[in-house]
Image (cartoon, rainbow, N blue to C red):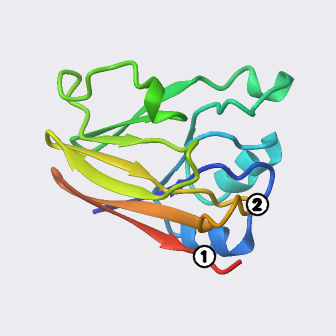
Amino acid sequence: MFRIGLISDTHGLLRPEAVAFLRGSDYIIHGGDIGHAGILQELAMLAPVTVVRGNNDIGPWATQIGETAFLKVGDLLVYALHDLAQLDIDPVAASVRVVVSGHSHKPLVAEREGVLYVNPGSAGPRRFKLPIAVGELIVAGSTVSARFVELEG
């Protein structure tokens, strides 16, 4: 069994509650709008990090980060991108089981055509009245479940 921690839209703020939630993950996916490279360095101390560049990730530190990324965990293929509206593949045809995104700051877990779409929400500064949240995927063989958790804040 594998645990993939999900975080997005930190916008330069890595909350201690988010770090505590992600601790113990086998992998971490950051869905973009990171804020600065220090966030990725801190996450990398917890687990291997797969990251995508968000629309607010600018500057020399962000140029090396791709707009999309794949993560293979066992038999499961996960595809990450920042803005789900810019999905550039057919997940079913690409044998992707999970699509992880960010951008909207709205947590989401939904399944369509056998593909699980997960947005962990925003773990950074509060935006409007949206929750501060993180998420996780639990992978056991070919099965996967997802959830998001609201943090205090």
The residue beneath circle 2 is 125
Q: Residue at x 67, y 75 (%)?
A: 17
From the top left corner, tell me how far across and down residue 34 is, in percent.
71, 43
Where on the picture, by quarter, is residue 21? bottom right
Amino acid type indicated by mark 1: Leu
CB within 8 Å, label 1 to label 2: no
Instruction: Say above or below: 115 vs 1.
Output: above
Instruction: Say above or below: 150 vs 10.
Output: below
- Residues 78 and 117: in front is 117
Instruction: Look at the numbered disc 1 and give the secondary structure of its residue.
Output: loop
Amino acid type indicated by mark 2: Pro
Q: Residue at x 80, y 27 (%)?
A: 58
Residue 41 left/right relative to 119:
right
| First reached walking from the N terminus: tag 1 or tag 2 | 2
Where on the picture, by quarter, is residue 109? bottom left
- Residues 13 and 103: in front is 103
The residue beneath circle 1 is 151
From the top left corner, tell me how far across and down residue 137 is, in percent.
36, 58
Badge 1: residue crowd in 10 Å (few <14, some 14–19, many ≥20): some
From the top left corner, tell me how far across and down residue 114 is, in percent.
15, 42
- Residues 104 and 71: in front is 104
From the top left corner, tell me how far across and down residue 30 is, in percent.
58, 46
Q: Residue at x 67, y 54 (%)?
A: 43
- Give the Cα separation between the discs numbered 1 and 2: 12 Å
Badge 2: residue crowd in 10 Å (few <14, some 14–19, many ≥20): some
Instruction: Say above or below: 32 vs 148.
Output: above
Residue at the farthest bottom position: 152
Return the mark for residue 17: none
Residue 141 left/right relative to 136:
left
Locate the C terminus and report the quarter of the image it occupies: bottom right
